[in-house]
Amino acid sequence: AALGSLPEAANLRSLDLRAWDTPAAITALAHAPNFAGVRTLYLRDVNVNADDARHLFRAAHLRGLARVHVRGDGGWSVDTVQEFAEAGFTSLTSLRFTRAGLGDDAARALARCAALKGVTDLDLGHNALTGRGVTD
């Protein structure tokens, strides 16, 4: 929260957050428009729950992200992915939702997401996908 309140935070292009209080950090990211210049967001060494992920996806000032790497807590659902899909991320080139507990229905919702049109790096590792979710 302290970093996000600084005008200098607008100069940041990449955030790699590790070993921190997840809800507090997500709230700070979601409510600090000074982070609007961030293009790479790595939240991969913690477990982000579905509510925190949805809160992050709703943050309009983060819609310019090009690389989003989030490790879930195994409790995400198709609703979590739908929230991401409806958020309007238009600059994505790399998307990684790992260990989120995503199933085949979530994979299909993600496949229909307009934000994937420019993605060249997609990682859905360590989820609950079957061949049906990958090929449908």
Image: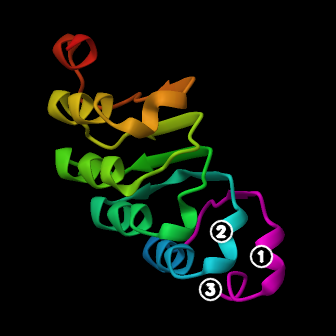
Eye-nearest disc, 3 or 2: 2
Q: Nearer the viewer, residue 23 or 39?
A: 39
Residue where numbered disc 1 is placed: 9
Q: Name the amino acid, label 2.
A: Ala
Mark 1 or mark 2, earlier in chain: 1
How far across and how far down the image is residue 35, in percent?
67, 71
Q: Nearer the viewer, residue 76 or 65?
A: 65
Mark 1 or mark 3, earlier in chain: 3
Q: Is residue 65 magenta?
A: no
How far across and how far down the image is residue 136, in percent?
19, 14
Highlighted range, magenta: 1-20
Is residue 74 shown to the viewer in this render? no
Mark 3 or mark 2, earlier in chain: 3
Eye-nearest disc, 1 or 2: 2
Q: Which mark is residue 1?
A: 3
Q: Give left or right: position of 43 versus 27.
A: right
How far across and how far down the image is residue 6, in percent?
77, 87
Q: Distance between the residues labelled 1 and 2?
A: 9 Å
Residue where numbered disc 2 is placed: 36
Q: Name the amino acid, label 1.
A: Ala
